[in-house]
Every structure is written in structure tokens, then in C-alpha cells.
Image: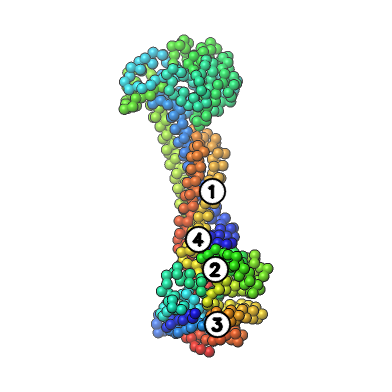
């Protein structure tokens, strides 16, 4: 040792039981805070990701198909529904629409990639604004006929082929993970999906319609002009266009947002209770430890430590505990959350999308920082008492 | 440089027949001189440690002042008084006083480190002191591995490391056998002979032959022996 700054480290290292106990408590703090943050942020991320994936303010679907739409988007139950193409024209006359594009849904049966049916979504390359922005991230160029882009969780890779209803399609790209059910979907252009719909009709699978695919669409994605009230535009469509349902994307997602909010509240409450309990425990432990250490502080006073430097030693020890415990807690909770994220997702029935690495590091840093601040705060009373140690009296009491 | 206590006294709250306080140390003048061992004898509870603590800047007297040279100790703020204690006083408190997380060498060097970094010179001095007090080979041992006598000698080395002007030793031979007691007393004599003022509180009869001035403490009253 050649500097007094090493004393706090020595004190921490040379008292493994005491240090271990304090560390365990800080690990609890940091674990709960970081895991709670990760879960809440991942839920938020999942919903934001779904929101941006849809990219539309309003989705128009056939009357009574809203349930089907939600099943596709939220529960990942592949489905399909159709309405007449003429809806497009009627809706386009509604005031306040900035962009509009039609989409087509089809559920596969037994593709060679997957044991389960998967969702096929077709879009109109000319007017699309909902799919392309993020499609472009994994595929540049225009999708040719019988070319498909697969969602992150579809078990197929670029260059491979998938067969739907006897039609062979080339996989042209794979999308990044969104954390939503759309990770299980396959995307293709309008003419491809029409071919597929026709093929499904011919195989007698698609019982909903026997109509010519050219006259059908599944949904209309609408972007509302700035300055227009989305709800009013949706209401207007509902009143004036027959046999369709205009769904405000926001309110559909709000359904899950609601449960998200409740869940976030529960998680935050759990974390908060844990913090209160552990902080009190820390406070008590630090105080108890000071009683044991009075003699040590008295000796330091005798050899010339000022009150201030005694208090600083105690606080610095607490900072060390905070940083190490905080770091350990972050490591443990990131491990736990990544290990159990699938299970959590299933249990909650909500999409989970982990924040980006940078964001994660940021939360990790903040958690450690918080622990590094909170630990000395709980030790403050003890530091004060250490500084007040009456060396004369303490050393008399052998 | 002398340490001078002027009209110092210490009283504590305690209900007695006459009053609700008592004098642990009754009003007295007291002086520690360079090169001399000033010994205080007395029964347990007579106020010896209290007087030593007052003189060494650890316990403010109820009345009176303590001076080191021209400096009135208790007029200083904590920071200055602490530094003064560190630089001028080597204090050997009653009992065992090793810091558990530091080994012998680190314990002895600790006073140096409080306000500076260790240097080649201080480490050498520490090693010389370790030899003088007979702790060679135990540099890396921790307090819980040392005997009572070894701990006491470590405390002496620690008190000497800053080359203080005054040494305050409160029963430095407390629970030591005759041989160790003799060693410690000789060390203190040697220290005094180097020009340091030594205040020695002890029960030990054999201490008297090492002391230059002997006081007796009796129920807070200080008398020349
Ligand atoms: N902080 C205090 N509060 C109340 N009484 C005290 C305090 N410190 C010391 N005393 C009392 O003052 C008296 C003198 O105590 P002191 O420690 O100076 O005795 P001592 O001569 O050093 O005894 P010993 O030989 O046992 O060490 C004792 O009666 C003690 O109880
Ligand atoms: Mg005493």
C-alpha cells in the first residue's frame, strides 16, 4: 500500500463476510432495477416496433374482420379475409387521406419451411408505404414476381425456395427481428399473392371466396394528412363506406398498450418495493458495521485522520460496494432476461423487443451509477457516526 | 518543544452526593518536556487516560488549554488539529490497536499515508523501526496473527514513524510479560534519549527506574511522586 486511497479497497477485500452481505444487497438492487427496466423497455419496444411496422394510421378491413386482423397482428394466428376492390375508390374520396395502399392476406398450409401455417402478406409496390421502408433494410430493389421476403423467425434463408399451394417462391431476403408476430410472416408483391390466392382457391383451401383475385383486397392501409384527426377520418369511413370497418391502429395497439401499462406498473411496483426493503437493509447493515468498526475509526483518529477523511473512507467503501454489486446485478439480470425472454413473452402474450445494444449499455451504466450513488447514501448516516467517534472514549473501552 | 496543559480539568455528568458531575481530572497544570519520560501512575479509574487524551489532542478539556509551543490545540478546527496530531504526536492507545485489514508494515506506515504518499525513505524508516521493535519477519502478518506483545510493539513503531515530537503511551505494557515489558520500556527510554517528550501512563512498578518525572493520579488529583 502506498496511498491512503487504497485503504477502502483493503477494508472491503479483507472483510469478505461483511462485504459479501453488502454486495448481495446491492446485487438485489441492481438486478431488480435492470431486469425491470429491460422488461418494460422490451415490451414498449415490441409495441413500438409493431406500430412502426404497420406504418398506417388507419387500417380498413371488411366488416367483422377486425378480430381476424388482431389475431394476425397480435396473436400470430394466420388468417385471411377479403373485400371488393371497389372499396379503394370509395375510401380514396374521403377527405384527409395522405397515402393509401392495399394489402392482401393469405394463410399458408404446409409450406416446406414450417410445420405450422404461416401468414403471407402481399402489398402493392406502386403505392405501398407500410412495408417497403423496413423491407428495404434487408432487400434492395423491387420484389419480382414469385420472390418473397421472410420474417425473422421463418425458417428459411436467402437463396432458398419455399412452396406455397404448389407455387415455388424464391426467398430474396430476411427481415430483422421486430419482436412481434410479424416475424413469422412472409411478404410478397401484389401479383405473387394473387397467384397464390388463385392457387389456394384451386386447391379448395380458401373457402372464403371464389371470386377472381383481381377484384379482391384484404385491407387498406391509410396514412392521414397532418392536421386531420385520425379518429374523425376513421369515423367518417365507418359511416360512409359500406361493409367495411376502419380501425385506428393506435386504438388497436392500445388494447395491448393498456395491458402493457398495467404490467409496467406491476413491475415498477415490485422493483420499488424491493428497493425500499433492500435500502433499509443496507442502512441497518451499514449502521451495524459501524458499531463493530468504532475501534478501527478511533485508531485512525488517533494517528491523525480528520473527521472528514474518516467519513470519506466509509463513503468510498460504499461506492466500491455499489459499483461492484451494481455491475454484478446488471450482468446477472441481463443473463436472466435473455435466457427467459421467450418464456416471458409467452407468459405475457405481448411482443418483446430488447433495446439496442447501445441503449442496453446506457441502462446498464445508469443502473451501476444509481447503485454507486444509492449505496453511499445509505451509508451516509454511518459515515457521520464514524466521523463522530470519540477516540478517547472508544479506546478506553477495551 | 514542550506540551503544556494550563488549568486543565475534565468533568463528566454523574450524580454524586455533592453535585451531579464529578471530576475525572481535577484542575491542574501539566507539562511534558523534551528528552524526558513523564510517568503517571495511579489506580484504575483515577483519570490517567483522561489526562493523556486531553494532552494528546483527543479530548477537549472542560476547562483550560493545552499548548504545543505557541499553538493552543483546542482552538484549532478538526482538520488542523488532526494534522497537528499526525505530524507531532505519536500516540500508543490503551489496548490492541491494529487495523485488521492492513498488515504490520501497512499499519506502521499508515500515519505517513494519511497526508502523503509513501516514499522510499519512509518505507526504509518503517523497516528500520520494525527491526528496532523486533518485528522482523512479521511485516506481512495481519493483526489477528500477532500476539499481544507484538501488537503493542507494532503500535510503538507506528507512533514513531512520523518522527514525532511527543509520544503518548497509555499502558503500553498492559498485558505483557516481564521480558516484553522491559523491551517496551527500554524502547521508550531510547526514544526519550533521542530528544522526544514521552508521556507514559502505567501500573508497572518497574517503569519508575526509566522515568525522569513521576506523577501519581488519585481520584482525578495529580500529585508529584
Ligand atoms: N466519556 C466518559 N463519560 C463518563 N465518564 C467517563 C468518561 N470517560 C472517563 N470517565 C470516567 O472518568 C474516570 C477516569 O477514567 P480514565 O479512563 O481516565 O481512568 P484510568 O485512570 O485511565 O483507568 P484505567 O487504569 O482503568 O485505564 C473513570 O471513573 C471513568 O468512569
Ligand atoms: Mg486508562
Give the mark nearest the N terminus, 2 or 3.
Answer: 3
Give the foreground label among 4 and 3. Answer: 3
Give the foreground label among 2 and 3. Answer: 3
Residue under label 4: A314
Which of A288 and A37 lies nearest the eye of the viewer?
A37
**Could you tell me if the residues under marks 2 and 3 are in contact, i.e. CB atoms within 8 Å?**
no
Furthest residue in direction front, as rendered: B121
Can you say whether B100 is above or below A31 in the image? below
Residue at x-position 48% and y-position 72%:
B84
Can you say whether A327 is above or below B199 in the image? above
Which of A171 and A341 lies nearest the eye of the viewer?
A171
Element carrying mark 4: helix
The chain letter for the residue carrying disc 4 is A
- Return the mark for residue A327: 1
Residue under label 2: B111
Mark 3 Cβ inside 8 Å of ligand 2? no
Using the numbered discs, state the Cα–Cα distance from disc 1 to disc 2 in whole angstroms: 34 Å
Using the numbered discs, state the Cα–Cα distance from disc 1 to disc 3 in whole angstroms: 56 Å
Furthest residue in direction right, as rendered: B137
Using the numbered discs, state the Cα–Cα distance from disc 2 to disc 3 in whole angstroms: 23 Å
Q: Position of residue B29 (x, y in %)?
A: 45, 84
Amino acid at each position: 500500500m502506498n496511498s491512503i486511497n487504497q485503504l477502502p479497497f483493503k477494508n472491503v477485500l479483507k472483510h469478505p463476510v461483511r462485504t459479501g452481505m453488502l454486495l448481495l444487497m446491492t446485487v438485489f438492487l441492481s438486478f431488480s432495477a435492470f431486469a425491470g427496466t429491460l422488461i418494460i423497455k422490451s415490451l414498449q419496444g415490441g409495441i413500438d416496433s409493431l406500430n412502426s411496422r404497420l406504418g398506417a394510421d388507419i387500417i380498413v378491413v371488411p366488416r367483422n374482420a377486425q378480430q381476424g386482423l388482431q389475431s394476425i397482428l397480435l396473436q400470430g394466428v394466420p388468417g385471411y379475409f377479403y373485400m371488393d376492390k371497389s372499396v379503394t375508390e370509395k375510401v380514396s374520396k374521403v377527405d384527409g387521406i395522405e397515402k393509401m395502399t392495399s394489402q392482401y392476406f393469405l394463410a399458408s398450409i404446409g409450406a416446406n419451411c414450417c410445420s405450422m401455417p404461416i401468414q403471407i402478406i402481399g402489398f402493392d409496390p406502386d403505392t405501398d408505404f407500410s412495408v417497403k421502408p423496413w423491407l428495404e433494410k434487408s432487400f434492395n430493389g423491387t420484389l419480382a414476381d414469385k420472390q418473397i421476403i421472410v420474417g425473422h423467425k421463418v425458417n428459411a434463408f436467402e437463396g432458398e425456395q419455399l412452396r406455397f399451394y404448389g407455387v415455388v417462391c424464391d426467398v430474396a431476403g430476411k427481415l430483422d427481428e421486430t419482436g412481434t408476430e410479424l416475424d413469422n410472416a412472409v411478404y410478397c408483391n401484389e401479383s405473387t399473392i394473387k397467384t397464390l390466392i388463385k392457387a389456394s382457391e384451386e386447391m379448395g383451401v380458401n373457402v372464403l371466396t371464389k371470386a377472381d383475385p383481381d377484384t379482391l383486397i384484404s385491407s387498406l392501409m391509410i396514412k392521414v394528412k397532418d392536421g386531420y384527426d385520425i379518429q374523425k377520418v376513421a369515423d367518417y369511413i365507418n359511416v360512409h363506406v359500406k361493409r367495411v370497418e376502419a380501425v385506428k391502429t393506435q386504438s388497436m395497439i392500445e388494447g395491448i398498450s393498456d395491458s402493457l401499462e398495467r404490467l409496467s406498473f406491476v413491475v415498477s411496483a415490485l422493483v420499488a418495493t424491493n428497493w425500499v426493503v433492500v435500502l433499509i437493509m443496507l442502512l441497518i447493515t451499514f449502521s451495524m458495521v459501524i458499531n463493530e468498526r468504532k475501534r478501527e475509526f478511533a485508531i485512525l483518529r488517533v494517528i491523525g485522520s480528520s473527521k472528514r477523511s474518516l467519513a470519506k473512507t466509509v463513503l468510498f467503501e460504499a461506492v466500491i460496494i455499489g459499483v461492484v454489486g451494481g455491475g454484478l446485478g446488471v450482468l446477472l439480470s441481463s443473463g436472466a432476461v435473455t435466457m427467459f425472454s421467450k418464456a416471458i413473452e409467452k407468459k405475457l402474450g405481448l411482443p418483446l423487443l430488447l433495446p439496442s445494444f447501445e441503449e442496453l449499455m446506457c441502462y446498464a451504466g445508469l443502473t451501476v451509477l444509481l447503485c454507486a450513488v444509492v449505496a453511499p447514501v445509505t451509508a451516509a448516516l454511518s459515515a457521520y457516526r464514524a466521523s463522530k467517534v470519540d477516540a478517547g472514549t472508544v479506546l478506553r473501552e477495551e | 518543544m514542550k506540551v503544556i496543559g494550563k488549568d486543565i480539568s475534565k468533568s463528566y455528568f454523574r450524580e454524586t452526593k455533592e453535585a451531579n458531575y464529578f471530576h475525572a481530572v481535577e484542575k491542574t497544570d501539566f507539562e511534558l518536556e523534551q528528552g524526558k519520560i513523564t510517568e503517571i501512575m495511579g489506580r484504575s479509574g483515577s483519570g490517567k487516560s483522561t489526562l493523556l487524551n486531553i494532552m494528546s489532542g483527543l479530548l477537549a478539556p472542560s476547562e483550560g488549554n493545552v499548548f504545543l509551543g505557541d499553538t493552543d490545540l483546542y482552538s484549532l478546527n478538526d482538520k488542523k488539529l488532526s494534522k497537528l496530531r499526525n505530524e507531532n504526536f505519536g500516540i500508543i492507545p490503551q489496548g490492541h490497536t491494529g487495523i485488521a485489514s492492513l498488515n504490520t508494515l501497512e499499519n506502521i506506515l499508515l500515519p505517513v499515508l494519511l497526508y502523503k504518499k509513501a516514499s522510499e525513505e519512509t518505507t526504509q524508516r518503517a523497516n528500520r523501526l520494525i527491526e528496532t521493535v523486533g518485528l522482523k519477519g512479521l511485516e506481512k502478518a495481519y493483526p489477528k496473527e500477532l500476539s499481544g506483545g507484538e501488537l503493542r510493539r507494532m503500535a510503538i513503531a507506528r507512533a514513531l514513524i512520523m518522527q514525532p515530537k511527543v509520544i503518548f503511551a497509555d499502558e503500553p505494557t498492559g498485558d505483557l510479560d516481564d521480558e516484553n515489558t522491559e523491551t517496551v520500556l527500554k524502547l521508550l527510554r531510547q526514544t526519550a534519549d533521542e530528544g522526544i517528550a514521552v508521556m507514559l501512563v502505567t501500573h508497572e512498578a518497574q517503569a519508575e527506574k526509566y522515568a525522569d518525572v513521576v506523577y501519581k493520579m488519585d481520584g482525578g488529583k495529580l500529585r508529584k511522586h
